[in-house]
Each structure stands twice: as C-alpha cells, then as structure tokens.
Image (spheres, grey):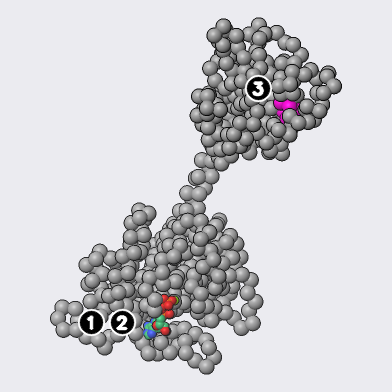
Amino acid sequence: MKNFPYILTISSEKGGVGKTTLATNLAIYLKAMHENLPVTVMSFDNHFTVDRMFELKGQSIRGTVQDMLTGTPGSELLHSGQYGINYIPSSNSLAELYQQFKGPMALCRMMAESGISGIVVLDTRPDLNILTQNALYAADRVLIPVKDMPSLENCKHIFALFDQRGIDKKSLSLIPCLIDSRIKYDGLFKDQRTLLRAFAINRGYRCMDIFISKSPKVESLNTNPEGKIYPILTHARGTEVHNQFVELARDVLTGYHQTAEPRAFLYHQWLTEQEDKKKGAFLARLEGILPHCVICGARHEGHEGTTAKGFYFESSDRVARGFLHSDCLARMLCCALYDVSPESETFELSLKVIRENARVSVAVLLPHAAEDDRQSLRFIQLDPSGGLLLERFISLDGFTEGQLDGIRDGLFLLLNETLLGYDSRLRNGWLAIHPVNEEQPELILQEVPYRRVQEFHRLVADTAVNGTI
Ligand SMILES: Nc1ncnc2c1ncn2[C@@H]1O[C@H](COP(=O)(O)OP(=O)(O)OP(=O)(O)O)[C@@H](O)[C@H]1O
Ligand SMILES: [Mg+2]
C-alpha cells in the first residue's frame, strides 16, 4: 500500500508573524503527542531554521528541498532529525526554480508520489511565490498566522488564490499569533485576540479559537551562545505558549485522523484515472489498425522478415489506418515517383535518397479526378511544420481496371486498401504516411504523438486540400 502524506502548510504574506516558529514547534508537539506518527518538516524559505533546529550533530546531508522540487521522491530525502522528526534540508537556491516550476499543482503531484506518510509540515516564505502557491494547493490544512491588522488584510490574497482555482476554502484558517495579553482595549473588543478574531470573521475568514501568545521566553529560544534554536516543548514548558501548542497540536491531530483521504491520495487517484483513460484511448486507437502491410500483404504479427514497421498511415476519414514496412514504402515510392522498375540500374541509388527523405517527412497522397474522369494522384512530401518539400503528379491510368505494370503495383495496392470507394474508383479523401520509430512503432498512437498527427492532418486539410500548397 502506497503512503500518502497529510499536508499542513503554514503561510502568510506578512513576514515575522511566527510562521517558522509555528511550523517547527508544531511538528515537535505532533510527534510528542503521537509517537508512532511520522512527522516531516521542510521549509521553502532560505533561513535554515529547520536545519538548525533538527539537524543531528555530524549528520551528512543527502539532498535538499531543491532536489525534491526537481523530481527526487521526498521519501529519499528524509533525514532523521532531533526529537524524532524527519526533515528535508533547506536550500538557498529555490528562487532559481520559480521560473521553471510547472504550475501550481506540481507539488501536490510530488507529494502524491513522494512515498512519505504521516504529517508533513510545510513552512513557506512571506510571499505568494509559485512555491507558496503550490504549498497552499497541496495542503489538507493551511494555518495562516495573523498578529495585527496588516497581516489580517494580507490574508485576502490567499483566499483569492483559492477562489481562482475553485478550491474549497474550508482548509484555510487564521490563527492569532504573537498575541500580547497585556494589551487591553475598552469596549466590545477587549483584547488583541478578540479584535483580530472579530475582524477575521467579519471578512468571512475562519479563525481559530486557539491562539499563540507573545512570550519573551519563546523569543529568547533562538538567541543563545550555541547558535541553536531550542523548542518550546523542551525549553519553555512553563509558558502559556506551551499549553497553547498542546491544544493546537491536539486540534491538528483530530483533523488528521478525520481525513481518510488526504489531498495527495485524491490526486494520486485522479492521476491513476487519467492514466487509465489514456491507456483506454491508446487501446481504442490500436483497434481497427490493419493487421498487415498493405503494400506487401504480410501480417505484422509474427512477421520474421527483415523489414520493420517504419511508417504509419491514416486516411483523412480515419477508415484506413495501419503500418507499412520501411522497405515496402521506400520501394513503392521509388518506383512510382521516379518511374523506375526495381530491375533498373538506378533503382538502388534512388532508393537510398527516398529512404532518407521519407524518414524526415510526411507523405500525403491526394487522388484527383480530371474532367475527362481520368484519375491521377497528387503526391506531396511535407516537412514537420507542413512546408512543401516535393510534389509529383502520378497517372493512375489502369488503376480502376486493376492493371499492374510492375512499377505502380505497390502504389495501386496501397490505394486499393486505403482509399477505394465505389465502382473501383478512389473516394474523396487523402492518405497521410508518417515515419515512426521502428523500435516502437505504436508509440505514435499514444496521446501526445497522436495529438501531433491530428494537428498535422488539420494542417493538411487547411492547406494541401484547399489548394494553398
Ligand atoms: N510566541 C512568540 N513569542 C515571542 N516571540 C515569538 C513568538 N513566536 C515567534 N516569535 C519571534 O518572532 C520572530 C518572528 O518569528 P518567525 O521567524 O517564526 O516568523 P515568520 O513568520 O516565520 O517570519 P518570516 O516571514 O521572516 O519567515 C522571531 O524572532 C521569533 O523568535
Ligand atoms: Mg519564517
């Protein structure tokens, strides 16, 4: 059974509101209160607080969050740290990733494929850069610390991000932090916390009853001669903040236990469905593919011949689809385009040129009936962007009567199985022949390459068929 983490993101655009203190200490309380629960911390900021707090003495570092964000599975980057916490070391080169990061849902996918279990606590930078957005969208729960009116004002951007993507905002909640209980007001809102809470609720934000007080003891935990950062649990147990963290951790654990299917799991499920759909579409495309090479007639399956499937053909109405042997197509083109018989001296030389050209172009066969009812074929070769490389007109005299002349036989056989309509005449359509990877010819029918085939066919319909090339 795969592991899927429950993600808790701590985010606020405002700096110095207590995000990192909250993320790191909450992780410690979660672990302390649920010993068997794997708890992982990582930060998308570059201040290395996580490392200073959790790194074991002499520990060798096997990678950082940057590696995780560029594709290494998270579980391979977990470092066992102090207080039983796993952490992924921080990096100071995350800004380089902003440009290339693949959209706001990439982290959700990484978490779904990370192999990490338990709770992951994500600390973010005080801005809404692409990594913070990812951390928000991947989260099962987001805690937004607010300490004053400006930090409360800033919350609207996070809520707007969720609105933009139509994501349920119930995972978002504000938590008053750095609350100075000495500050008292006259009137309805008697203190800082009540005031912030009232304003938050008035704006439609969910705000927790739990809050974190400002404490000189807590503030002193990262100022000491050892340059370490001490946890509240071990070094500030006597404070009000300790009890508040216990309460908060309990609340987070309740949420964790109530979440049977974290977002990472749901994303994994969605990805699996997409993969199944893709597989289904691929199999559907394989269906109806002609089982043989329509030039030589040999079946592809179990065909021990020397020539591989080298080309994929498809008629404009998709009625005829299949693969051609590389050699069959090259020989057919050599005869029909240059009007030479396989016995002629120049044949092998022409064949070499034709082979090379065919591998880098798409051939399009467009039958044409003249006013006197005589059929001919316009043959064009196009480069991958649809540019005209070669054009030839080939007489189809004798096709309807089934006359073979030793030169156009291959072409007649191909047309016969792909574009034949009523009365032994060619129907109103055309045939495109694409080079394929000889090792894995069916790859062309997978989603992305096949989409390119379809786009190319639309281009052919727009240009070659209506006469602009
Ligand atoms: N409960 C608290 N009582 C007193 N001081 C605190 C408390 N929580 C955090 N601090 C102090 O406030 C400062 C800012 O805290 P912290 O670094 O956690 O905020 P932040 O939101 O992560 O900041 P940044 O946005 O710069 O990353 C730190 O000096 C920290 O020690
Ligand atoms: Mg911080």
Rounded to the nearest angstrom, the CA distance separating label 2 from label 1 is 9 Å
Query: Where is the C terminus found, in terms of image quarters?
Result: top right
Which dot, 3 or 2, sits closer to the camera?
3
Q: Which residues are magenta?
A: 325-330
The kind of residue tagged 3 is: Arg
Judge by depth and name the residue closer to the eye, 212 or 419. 419
The secondary element bearing badge 1 is classed as loop
User: Which residue is at 44% across, 74% downward?
Assistant: 23
Q: Which mark is residue 191?
A: 1
| Other residues around mark 2 within 10 Å, as few (<14) / some (14–19) / many (≥20) | some
The kind of residue tagged 2 is: Ile
Judge by depth and name the residue closer to the eye, 451 or 446. 451
> From where the camera sits, is residue 334 visible?
yes
Q: Position of residue 341 (x, y in %)?
A: 79, 17
- In which of the image's four quarters is ligand 2 placed? bottom left
Q: Residue furthest left?
A: 187
The secondary element bearing badge 2 is classed as loop
Q: Determine whether label 2 and label 1 are within 8 Å by CB.
A: yes
